[in-house]
Image: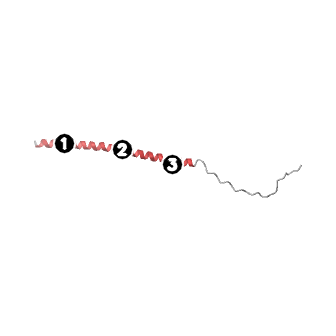
Amino acid sequence: MFSCSRKKERLVQETVAQRVAAFREKETAKCRAELLVQAEQIVDSLLLHEALSDVQDSLKQLRPFKPVPPAVIAPIDSLKIKPIFEQ
């Protein structure tokens, strides 16, 4: 009778150990899947931010700045213009 109870106890322990191992494996897979989803969201948001910042930088450089007009140059002589050949 004593050996029968040991066999039952050992069988129960093995069954419990199998169930615990299966539960751990299932929970590990579920946690890994959740972590992958979170990591994908983070990576996607970083890539989107980088792409948008590149586009915004390129749009800023699309049109060059307006140059400053040159300074006015004074005429060399102040004589009036007259025709070279008179009629």
Q: Are marks 1 and 2 in contact (CB under 8 Å)?
A: no
Residue 5 x/y as whole percent: 13, 42
Residue 55 x/y as whole percent: 53, 46
- Which callout, 1 or 3, points at the residue further toward the start of the chain? 1
- Please name the residue shown 35% across and 44% down the image: 32
Dot 2, crowdedness within 10 Å: few (<14), some or many (≥20)?
few
Foreground tag (1 vs 3) = 3
Whether residue 67 is situated above or below residue 3 in the rendered picture: below
Residue under label 2:
34
Which mark, residue 87? none
Q: Is residue 87 left or right of residue 18?
A: right
Residue 80 x/y as whole percent: 82, 55
Identify the amino acid type marked 2: Glu
Residue under label 1:
12
Identify the amino acid type marked 1: Val
- Which callout, 2 or 3, points at the residue further toward the start of the chain? 2
The CA distance from mark 1 to mark 3 is: 61 Å
- Which callout, 1 or 2, points at the residue further toward the start of the chain? 1
Which mark, residue 53? 3
Dot 1, crowdedness within 10 Å: few (<14), some or many (≥20)?
few
- Please name the residue shown 20% across and 44% down the image: 13
The CA distance from mark 2 to mark 3 is: 29 Å
